[in-house]
Amino acid sequence: MNLITLCKMTDNATFPTPEHDHSICIRKAISVAEQLCLTRGVQLTPIRHKILELIWNSHKAVKAYDLLDQIRPVNDAAKPSTVYRALDFLLEQGLIHRVESLNAFVGCHCSDTQHDQLLLICTACNTVEERSAPLVLGALAGELGEAGFISQRKTIEIHGLCKSCHATSNTLEENATQ
C-alpha cells in the first residue's frame, strides 16, 4: 500500500455511511503502521499493535480506560501505564491523534506525514472525521503569520452533527410536527 494513497483518500473524506466496510480501514491502518515502524526502525510490539487495532475498531474516539477494559481479556496483566505507554508511542509515531476535547484517541489517516488537523466530531454518534482542509488551515497559517506567532502544532476540533445524524434529526423533527 502506498502510504500517500491512504492520506489522499481522506482529502474529501466524509463520515462513514451505514454500509461502510470498516474492516478495510483497519487493514490499511495496520499495514501503514507496520510499514512506517519498519522504515523508522521502531517496534510495533504486540501490545502497541493491539491498542492501535482497538482504536481503529471504529471511527469514534476511544478513551484510554476503555482501551484498558478491552485489552484485559487479551492481556490480564495490563495496567493503565501499559495503555498510556502504548498510546504515547502511537502518538509519537503519528499513528493516532488525541482528541483533546474528549480526552480520547482516534486513528490517523495520514500517518506518514507531520500535519495539522481538522477534526469534525459528531455529538450524536461520536464519530470523528479527520480532514486535510487546506483552505482552512492555510487561512489559519496566514493569521498566525500576521500575528508573528509560531505554532508548535495545530488541531482544530469542531463539534456538531454529521450528515447522517443531521438527516435523522430532521426526519425525527418532521415526524414530530406531523
Image (spheres, helix red, strand yellow):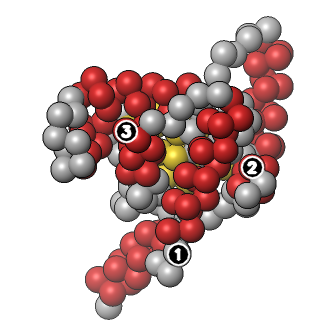
Q: Give the CA distance from mark 2 to mark 1.
A: 21 Å
35 w.r.t. 1: above or below = above
At label 2, counting other C-alpha atoms closer than 10 Å, the crowd grade (few under 14, some 14-19, many 20 or more) is some
Q: Which residue is mark 1?
A: 20
Q: Which residue is mark 2?
A: 3
Amino acid carrying label 2: it is Leu
Q: Residue at x 27, y 23 (%)?
A: 81
| Residue 151 figure quarter | top right
Q: Give whichever of discs 2 and 3 has the lower sequence position.
A: 2
Q: Give whichever of discs 2 and 1 has the lower sequence position.
A: 2
63 w.r.t. 122: above or below = above
Q: Secondary structure at mark 3?
A: helix
Q: Give whichever of discs 3 and 1 has the lower sequence position.
A: 1
Q: Which residue is mark 3?
A: 47
Q: Residue at x 50, y 81 (%)?
A: 19
At label 1, counting other C-alpha atoms closer than 10 Å, the crowd grade (few under 14, some 14-19, many 20 or more) is few
Residue 90 percent across, percent down from the top left: 50, 33
Q: Looking at the image, which is closer to me, 10 or 43?
A: 43
Front tag of 2 and 1? 2
Q: Looking at the image, which is closer to me, 29 or 165?
A: 29
Left or right of residue 12, residue 54 in this image: left
Q: Give the CA distance from mark 3 to mark 1.
A: 27 Å
Residue 11 percent across, percent down from the top left: 74, 55
Front tag of 2 and 3? 3
Q: Secondary structure at mark 2?
A: helix
Amino acid carrying label 1: it is His
Amino acid carrying label 3: it is Ile
Front tag of 3 and 1? 3
Q: Residue at x 52, y 75 (%)?
A: 21
Q: Is residue 45 visible?
A: yes
Q: Quadrant of the N terminus?
A: bottom right
